[in-house]
Image: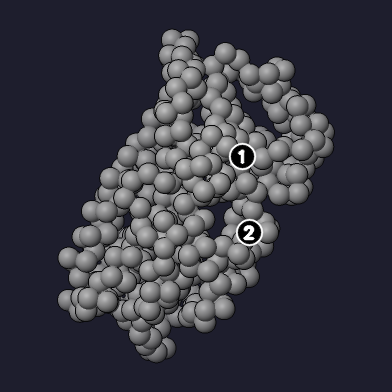
Amino acid sequence: MDETLNADVIIAGAGMAGATLALALHQGGLKPVLVDPQPFSAQLEPTFDGRSSAIAFSSFRAWDAIGVGDRMRPDVQRIEQILVTDGHKPGASTGGVGPFFLRFEAAEIADRVHGEPLGYMVENRRTRTGLAQAIEAAGLTVLAPARVEGVETTGSGANVRLANGRILTAPLVVGAEGRGSAVRKAAGIGTIGWDYRQTGVVATLKLERPHHGVAHEYFLPSGPFAILPLTENRVSLVWTESNRAAAALKAASPEAFLSLLRRRFGDFLGRIELTGPVFVYPLSLQLAERTTAPRTALLGDAAHGVHPIAGQGLNLGLRGAAALAEVLVDAARLGEDIGSPAVLQRYAAWRRFDTLTLSAGMDGFVRLFSNDHPLVRLARGVGMAAVNQVGPARRFFMQEAGGAVGDLPRLFRGELL
């Protein structure tokens, strides 16, 4: 088959970052085409992705601005409080927190962020559903299942060859198809990073007692242990363990898993029960050596795969989508070639500092809080206690986590492109 299809931007990867970019470009008057090896119907199945994501309030502003926020809001849980503790086992299971902890409360910054919560928790499959519905309503072209097999760039555009022989042409191709990005490989962009030798064990639990919108993050010697609130009095569990221990948890019967979990979880939220399968996700850091190449831009995990320790990975990808959309839409309105080196350099320069500082910060957190050395534990505990006592520092961290600090794209300020 040698059928061609022309577009302004070809987006390889119809996941959450790629779909957000497509909707933003469409709002700005450009014609995107999405390509994904999985049909939308498969991505919406409960067994496709068991994770839930903490969405910064500024990220949700962007979704509102592109017309998708209302589709997700019924399935979104506000995070009203975050409690961070450090110990050999969760503070909840010992009857309370120790002397070293951090407490963040949405009410403390409500006047600065127009009543927004600290963030929102939403299951990934619900996010995918909202984005898929918005893409269908907008009439965007989605080729799925379809796999990118090769990319050739010229001075005037990019030719994307699909596995079925179809050729797509556009001034620009965006790789948003995850850590194994075919677009990144075709552009000759290498990666740097390392394996943390940890695995995230993820499950959804139903609680007996109300969670009141409180997110709990325990830093244990094996890694973070997070209890994150969801709608319908459920929580998303993210239990970080060594690869061997995580494999055993995945293989355990539901009864054995719950027995081990109750010992780790404690009983402060009453009886708990599994509401679906247990998922495991190996944890590593992977950064692209650069985010652009001739006629090529990278987005989301194709550009930066980070540890989920503070739940910032998806938000980083969404900020990238908003920034890239703004750069491309503004360039098109000025009559520029949207795939030219000058335009892509604006995107790369804008995102470089945010990506590097957040990636380095998450890596530092992993190393600091997965360390059981007594002196290190004491130092980080004292640091947490100090931040907890300094109001301005605490409020800054809350606004930073909410994505309200720095050079924000217009969508993240709630403005249309």
Q: From the viewer's perspective, is residue 357 above or below residue 190?
A: above
Say which mark, if any, is on residue 80: 1
The mark total stands at 2
Q: Please, what secondary structure does the residue beneath circle 1 have? A: loop
Q: From the viewer's perspective, is residue 118 above or below residue 260?
A: below
Which residue bears the numbered disc 2? 73
Q: Can residue 177 be seen from the camera position used here?
A: no
Q: From the viewer's perspective, is residue 269 above or below residue 317?
A: above
- Residue 239 point in image, percent of width and height: 61, 35
- Residue 107 point in image, percent of width and height: 57, 37
**Closer-to-camera residue (309/202):** 309
The residue type indicated by label 2 comes to Arg
Q: Is residue 400 left or right of residue 329?
A: right
- Which residue is rendered at x = 61% and y = 39% of the image? 80
Label 2: few (<14), some (14–19) or many (≥20) C-alpha neighbours in 10 Å: some
Dividing the picture into quadrants, the one containing residue 261 is: top right
Whether label 2 touches label 1, CB < 8 Å: no
* Label 2 or label 1, whichever comes before in sequence order: 2
